[in-house]
Image: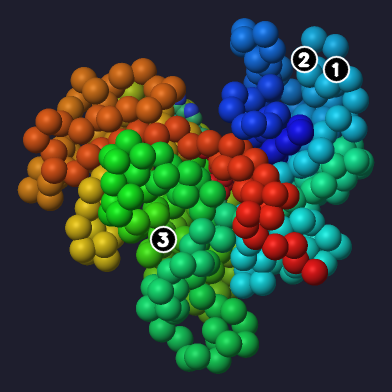
Amino acid sequence: MNIFVINSGSSSIKYQLFQTPLSQPVCSGLIERIGLPDAVITHKTYTGGTEQVTKISANIATHEEGMLETGRLLTAPGTGVLQNPDEIDIVGHRIVHGGETLTQTTVITPRVKDEIKKLFPLAPLHNPGHLKGIEVAEKIFKRATQIAVFDTAFHQTMPEKAFRYAVPDVFYKNYGIRVYGFHGISHKYVAGQAMKYLKKPDAKLITIHLGNGCSMAAIKAGVCVETSMGLTPLDGLIMGTRCGNIDASVLLYLMTEQGYTAERLTELLNKQSGMFGLTGQSDMRYIRKMLDEGSEAAKLAYEMYAYRIRKYIGSYAAALEGLDAIVFTAGVGENDSLVRELVCKDMRYFGISIEETKNRQPAGGFLDISAVESGTKVLVIPTNEELEIADQCLALINNKAGAPFN
Ligand SMILES: Nc1ncnc2c1ncn2[C@@H]1O[C@H](COP(=O)(O)OP(=O)(O)O)[C@@H](O)[C@H]1O
Ligand SMILES: CC(=O)OP(=O)(O)O
Ligand SMILES: [Mg+2]
């Protein structure tokens, strides 16, 4: 069986083609910096045990263009691994927001697409691209069963005291105003890997997903009890272009005193804030370069980014009533040793200390960067949302989990 997985992030599309039984993919790819002038496509094939890498600089303005290009690469001479797109049996789509109705992995029906559309305002950087991705995939992979796997699903186990906001009940009951949480596919995957490594099924973990979007989760025995994103993927940590946690009065002030419209505020907080607002750049690789060249703005931005994570570590250890390990993952978490260093600096009193030589090892695989005396393990675990999605698609098809949404 051929399973093609599409993971659209806010700035990227990642894809992997798997054959059952799931192990090494047949091909994988990453389209980075979508919407920026210098998007890059990296397409890898793994046939015959050798990895062949193709890098293409392209102008990819939208996720729709990215998806069309992905479909082309799968069958094109030189990069292709299929004779015909009809060889794909399942397409697994990462969907960021499933709201309160789409809480399990599900076969995509017209009703599922309608629900994804209804949630556009709650995931403006993601759900519109996902729906386009589904529509393009339905055209390219006509024979395949299209399946949706939701970022929000893993966080559904949070207790009510964690997922409710302190506003009148009616706002939850009538409008679904609550914490949903995102990046659940990634948090679930890396938590599973950490529990295996620690050989501790009841481990108390804090998983720290730092990509273009950033979030943290507190996980006890594989079950999510807290997470940092909220109704939308805007709350919590400082991100590439999103502000994270902010006093709601800032918005009220800007609306009432400075004439900001809701539309301008959406744009400001989602696309012009975060690291971009502080430095003019959203990509951590560029901000690191600025820092190395002496930029004060980059220095402050790095400090703020790490400080916010530290505050959440403190509060999540309290929520978990203990801590076995913290796990760094995603683009920044896996690659940026300076972020990890700033987060873990002077935390010995808290039971966390890392060994700098271990922290600076080349990225690309699993790392245990804890110092010998660290009571809490500090791990770097590459996320693999695509493998987790493929696994959940198979479980659905084999009737092991989830249920179609009718
Ligand atoms: N070598 C690196 N060093 C530091 N940051 C990196 C590196 N590689 C990628 N990143 C960061 O990772 C981010 C993308 O992470 P990713 O998890 O792929 O994001 P998303 O899924 O949200 O699009 C980039 O914006 C960049 O800031
Ligand atoms: C939810 C979210 O922010 O996802 P990503 O980091 O992939 O943009
Ligand atoms: Mg991502």
The spot of residue 135 in percent (x, y) is 85, 48
Does residue 318 appear left or right of residue 194 in this picture? left
Q: CA distance from mark 3 to mark 1?
A: 42 Å
The spot of residue 321 in percent (x, y) is 21, 63
Secondary element at image label 1? loop
Quadrant location of the C terminus in the rendered image: bottom right
Secondary element at image label 2? loop
The spot of residue 194 in percent (x, y) is 35, 41
Residue 327 vs 158, above or below: the answer is above
Point 40% across, 74% down: residue: 159
Does residue 166 appear left or right of residue 36 in this picture? left
Q: Is residue 310 visible?
A: no
Q: CA distance from mark 3 to mark 2?
A: 39 Å
Residue 202 vs 259, above or below: the answer is above
Q: Hey, what amino acid is under mark 2?
A: Thr
Q: Hey, what amino acid is under mark 3?
A: Cys
| Residue at the spot of label 2 | 79
Quadrant location of the N terminus in the rendered image: top right
The spot of residue 293 in percent (x, y) is 35, 23
| Number of the front mark, 3 or 2 | 3
Q: Choose between 278 and 370: the one closer to the eye.
A: 370
